[in-house]
Image: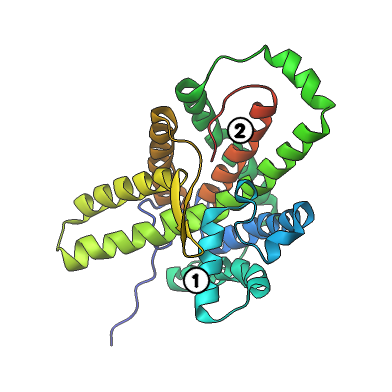
Amino acid sequence: MTRTKRTDRPAGQLVSFLPDSYLDRTSRPIYALVYLLGFLLFYEIGTFMIHPETLTQSLAQPQMRVVAFVWVQNLLEFIGFGPRMTWIIAPFVVIVILLALQITSQTKWQVRVSDFIPMTAECILLAVPLIVLSIMLNRTGSPPAAILALQNAVDPIAQRILLVDIVTGIGAGIYEELIFRLVLICLLMMVFQDVFGMQKNNAIFFSVVISAVLFSAHHHFFFADGRFFKGDPFTVGKFVFRTLAGVYFAVLYAVRGFGITAGTHAFYNILAAFLRVLAFSAGPD
């Protein structure tokens, strides 16, 4: 009689850690699910509070929307859900996928809430290299930060923009990682290995590079709601930064799993939003 071998790491991860250590526990899909529930809820409520019309007009306010989230909505609409229902169902897509990964990983289901504080600290620390790289590649001349910070502190428009950036940044952190790392890299790996018979290392390399380039490109040009849109104006610095960020997130996903990767992406966007208020030119998500 054959017995199913218990895996020592979640699917998609390339690194195993000491069993039941902090790194092992927080790499599990169940940790990603529980940790990101608050982020999902904040994005849903925050977007509705900022602009209720987005419930029925997916791209009416492009600067307030997360394209990857709209793609999930479009898929749900194609299946047969109405626009309002897609807002409710979209987070469950993330939940169902992570539950499926948890089941197939055969790892423990226990979650220690005390791990969430060091997870948050880890995500913030992992976001710092991206902040530094973003400033190096995208920084432009601007008035002294202290002066603009003083102006923005009492500017209600700037405060609203900051709130919008935080809300959309959290949504981007989850749904872009869902689309470009968890789903796209998996699909590309299947194509390269199963269809083209490529060796695993080569398949990983090409999957990561292609997903990173597409991740960067979708910030500038994208297709949603049956139409093509122009996003952020294209510059070489922004495109290179986002491509490198895509590679960084892919490596992070392979080592630390979806929860830490999505959290790092979200906290990078939050930090970048605050830096923009302080007149630095940190690149968008």
Classed neighbour count for the residue bearing mark 2: other residues with Cα under 10 Å, few (<14), some (14–19), many (≥20): many
Q: Secondary structure at mark 2?
A: helix
Q: Position of residue 220 (x, y in %)?
A: 45, 43
For mark 2, what is the residue?
272
Q: Secondary structure at mark 1?
A: helix
Q: Position of residue 145 (x, y in %)?
A: 68, 16
Q: Position of residue 136 (x, y in %)?
A: 47, 21
Q: Quadrant of the N terminus?
A: bottom left
How is the structure coloured here?
rainbow
* Frontmost residue, 98 versus 3: 98
- Residue, x 38% and y 39% (percent of image)? 243
Residue 144: quarter of image = top right
Residue 91: quarter of image = bottom right
- Residue, x 61% and y 22% (percent of image)? 280
Q: Which amino acid lies under the numbered mark 1 shown in the image of this protein?
A: Leu
User: Which of the two marks, 1 or 2, is nearer to us in this view?
Assistant: 1
The disc placed on residue 117 is none
Labels 1 and 2: the sequence-earlier one: 1
- Residue, x 51% and y 64% (percent of image)? 225
For mark 1, what is the residue?
75
Badge 1 vs badge 2, beta-carbon distance below 8 Å: no
* Frontmost residue, 225 versus 207: 225
- Residue, x 64% and y 28% (percent of image)? 276
Look at the image and tell me whether residue 25 can be seen: no
Q: Position of residue 188 (x, y in %)?
A: 29, 60
- Hey, which residue is sitting farthest bottom in the picture? 1
Q: Is residue 129 above or below residue 98?
A: above
Q: Which amino acid lies under the numbered mark 2 shown in the image of this protein?
A: Ala
Q: Is residue 185 above or below residue 234?
A: below
Q: In this figure, what is the number of numbered marks?
A: 2
